[in-house]
Amino acid sequence: MDLYYLELSIHLTLDDNLAKEGDWTQFVEQYYGEVSIYSENVEDSILIGKIEFDILDVTLAINHKVQLLDVMDQIDSDRNKYAESIFDDSNGIIARDLGGEYLYPNDIFIFHMIELKEEFRGNRYGAEITKLIIERFSGRCGLFVIMPVPQQFKKNSEEQLGETYDQALKRLSGYWMSLGFEATVKDPDVLYRITGD
């Protein structure tokens, strides 16, 4: 078996409206990227998937006296689902079961998607990507959050795949839990990991 090296190419998505006063999205950095592997020479890399994530700028929100629960609610429904799972309803701080005030002023990392091409699944590349991301961003982010979604159902039916969506979700959630993530109390579909765990 060949030894492969993992390469992440990550880009920050910028919007002209980010700098406007009062624009909620100024507190959320949106990233997208490609994941490649290579054996000997980086020029011979093979694209194996893509990644999307956000970083919630907790320090900026604190300095502007803005609750991130409100920020996430204003952006879109997926982000609102994350927010409802990780923030305390009464005061907008991180829920106590997720570390509460102890995580501040660290930022929050939200995985939106790690999608590998079908032929590269099952080789632990997802685990390596996760490990690399957490190592890279744990100096800044104290909380990592994901809502696992089986991507294979976008193009295939349950009959074609030989498993139901719920079975695939349970398997995928178990995979993330094997990487140190735990289910949030408010929504077991949303998983979290505190840096250092």
Image (cartoon, rainbow, N blue to C red):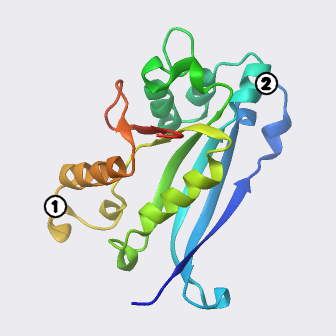
Residue found at x 66% / y 32%: 106
Residue 107 x, y percent position in the rendering: 65, 35
Q: What residue does disc 2 label?
A: 22
Residue found at x 55% / y 88%: 39
Corner quadrant of residue 182: top left
On residue 163, the disc is 1
Residue 111 x, y percent position in the rendering: 51, 48
User: Which quadrant is the N terminus positioned in?
Assistant: bottom left
Report if residue 69 is visible in the image: no
Q: Point out the residue furthest to the top here.
A: 90
Residue 34 x, y percent position in the rendering: 59, 69
> Callout 2: 10 Å neighbours few (<14), some, many (20+)?
few
- Looking at the rendered image, the disc whose residue lies closer to the viewer, 2 or 1, is 1
Depth check: give the residue in front, 153 or 8.
8
Q: Amino acid at mark 1?
A: Glu
C-alpha distance separating marks 2 and 1: 46 Å
Residue found at x 30% / y 61%: 153
Corner quadrant of residue 172: bottom left
Report if residue 187 is visible in the image: yes
